[in-house]
Image: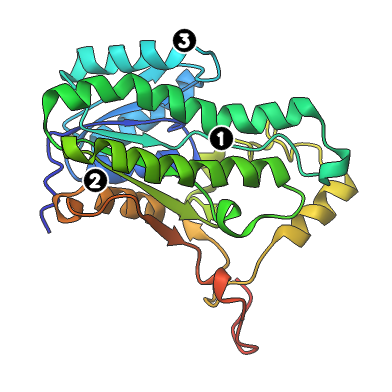
């Protein structure tokens, strides 16, 4: 299937690890030009090489800490200078500060969850939109949300609230930008794992064994994490990151030109609330 993405310019935020890396690779396989945004230059260089090997028309690492208020505008300007304009923005950067009951959480943790999931999306989208509107080439904006924003994840109250906010932004922006032939959609993963565990090695990954949030977990944190786990209806319990990439590629493709304000849920059927007793644990 010809997705029409060959030669299109794509920005993927949080692209040095896990879901973002899978998304960058998926666009590279379509022959797109991919800007890989992140903080870990060493991991970024690896993803650039991987993207070029997969068939990207061009690939570049753009170092940016998007938690800094001015970083998004600078990163987008750098990508536009490199590629001549941006066709697709994938707002993938996200995360959570801690696993804890809300009554025990802190305002610092709330602000982190809102900043990394919502504020980075707002700033990067606003930086990209003027160019997309001016180019009149049917831009695509894809927000990587989470099933936490749809059904809530216990012990992740502020993270769930932030992901829910992404849906409100997605549908509102879809209404505002439709007249410019820009589509705005979201992808909602449940749990994801890379096919290669080494892809979590970036220092920006919350799953990094040294710098991530589970580097030295307490017994309480491990117990809470176990309770968050939900049952899919499939033999495995998590999506592969390239499957999230496939959903993003579809939403950016010519085949999805009439799809906007929607969310593709990639959750293995967890919202069905049932698992056959004979289904092996994944």
Looking at the image, is mark 2 or mark 1 nearer the viewer? 2
- What is the secondary structure assignment of the residue under circle 1? loop
- Give the Cα separation between the discs numbered 3 and 2: 27 Å
Q: Which residue is mark 1?
A: 201
Residue in the image at 54% along x and 61% along y: 238
Q: Is residue 249 above or below residue 126?
A: below
**Left of 114 or right of it: where is 214?**
right
The picture places residue 28, in percent across and down from the top left corner, at 25, 39
**Left of 179 or right of it: where is 198?**
right
Q: Which residue is mark 3?
A: 70
Residue in the image at 47% along x and 53% along y: 188
The residue most toward the bottom is: 278
The image quarter containing residue 183 is top left
The picture places residue 89, in percent across and down from the top left corner, at 31, 33
Q: Are marks 3 and 1 in contact (CB under 8 Å)?
A: no
Looking at the image, which is closer to me, 152 or 168? Answer: 168
**Left of 57 or right of it: where is 195?**
right
Q: Residues within 10 Å of mark 2 (few under 14, many from 20)?
A: many
**Left of 76 or right of it: where is 187?**
right
Which callout, 2 or 1, points at the residue further toward the start of the chain? 1
Q: Which residue is mark 2?
A: 252
Which callout, 3 or 2, points at the residue further toward the start of the chain? 3
- What is the secondary structure assignment of the residue under circle 3? loop
């Amino acid at each position: 299937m010809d997705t029409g993405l060959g030669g299109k310019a794509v920005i993927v935020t949080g692209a040095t690890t896990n879901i973002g890396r899978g998304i960058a690779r998926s666009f590279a396989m379509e022959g797109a030009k991919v800007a890989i945004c992140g903080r870990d230059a060493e991991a970024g260089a690896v993803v650039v090489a991987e993207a070029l090997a997969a068939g990207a028309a061009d690939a570049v690492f753009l170092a940016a800490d998007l938690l800094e208020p001015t970083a998004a505008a600078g990163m987008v300007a750098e990508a536009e200078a490199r590629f001549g304009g941006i066709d697709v923005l994938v707002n993938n950067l996200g995360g959570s500060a801690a696993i804890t009951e809300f009554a025990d959480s802190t305002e610092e943790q709330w602000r982190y969850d809102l900043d990394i999931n919502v504020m980075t999306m707002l700033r990067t989208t606003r930086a990209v939109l003027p160019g997309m509107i001016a180019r009149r080439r049917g831009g695509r904006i894809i927000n990587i949300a989470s099933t936490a924003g749809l059904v809530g994840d216990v012990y992740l109250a502020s993270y769930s609230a932030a992901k829910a906010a992404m849906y409100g932004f997605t549908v509102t922006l879809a209404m505002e930008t439709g007249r410019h032939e820009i589509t705005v959609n979201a992808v909602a993963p449940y749990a994801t794992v890379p096919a290669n565990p080494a892809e979590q090695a970036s220092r920006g990954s919350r799953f990094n064994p040294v710098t991530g949030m589970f580097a030295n977990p307490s017994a309480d944190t491990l117990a809470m994490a176990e309770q968050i786990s939900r049952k899919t209806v499939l033999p495995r319990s998590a999506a592969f990151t390239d499957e999230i990439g496939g959903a993003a590629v579809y939403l950016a493709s010519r085949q999805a030109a009439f799809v906007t304000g929607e969310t593709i849920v990639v959750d293995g059927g967890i919202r069905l609330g049932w698992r056959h007793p004979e289904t092996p644990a994944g």
